[in-house]
Image (spheres, helix red, strand yellow):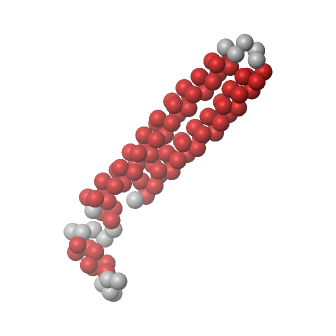
Amino acid sequence: MFGLLHHTYLAAATGGATTISGTKAGQAISSLITSSGTWIAGLGIPAGGLMIAYHAIMRNFSGGDASVDAHHLAAMKKVAVGTALVVGAGGIAHFMGGLF
């Protein structure tokens, strides 16, 4: 597409940077991805904790009804798995921002 000297053309077009991460736009995108990963993981943990606490409180207030207890226990397990997935996704986004 660029011919044999595409690296030279890229370096000339980007002010001497041979990779996209050497440009200001590349650095901004890297910072954005890293920050979004931090926010995702940072907000996922407290949100998951609050949801688990809610289901634990509602389970305690159920009055011993077995079906309500089972529902809230299943919900707590689903929230724990979902929180782990969100934190993992945030970690991957943070990691990928560092590679950019």
Against 47, residue 36 (above or below) is below
**In the rendering, at what x and y percent does residue 42 appear?**
46, 36
**In the rendering, at what x and y percent does residue 18 appear?**
31, 71
Instruction: Give the residue drawn at x 67%, y 14%.
Output: 61
In the picture, the quarter occupied by the C terminus is bottom left
In the picture, the quarter occupied by the N terminus is bottom left
Residue in front for this viewpoint, 21 or 58: 58
Instruction: Give the residue drawn at x 64%, y 19%.
Output: 58
**In the rendering, at what x and y percent does residue 14 appear?**
24, 69
Against 34, residue 1 (above or below) is below
Residue in front for this viewpoint, 75 or 40: 75
Q: Hey, which residue is sitting farthest right in the picture?
A: 66
Residue 59 found in image quarter: top right
**In the rendering, at what x and y percent does residue 94 appear?**
45, 49
75 left or right of 10 in image: right
Picture mark count: 0
Instruction: Give the residue drawn at x 41%, y 53%.
Output: 97
Residue 99 found in image quarter: bottom left
Instruction: Give the residue drawn at x 73%, y 22%.
Output: 69
87 left or right of 6 in image: right
Residue 55 found in image quarter: top right
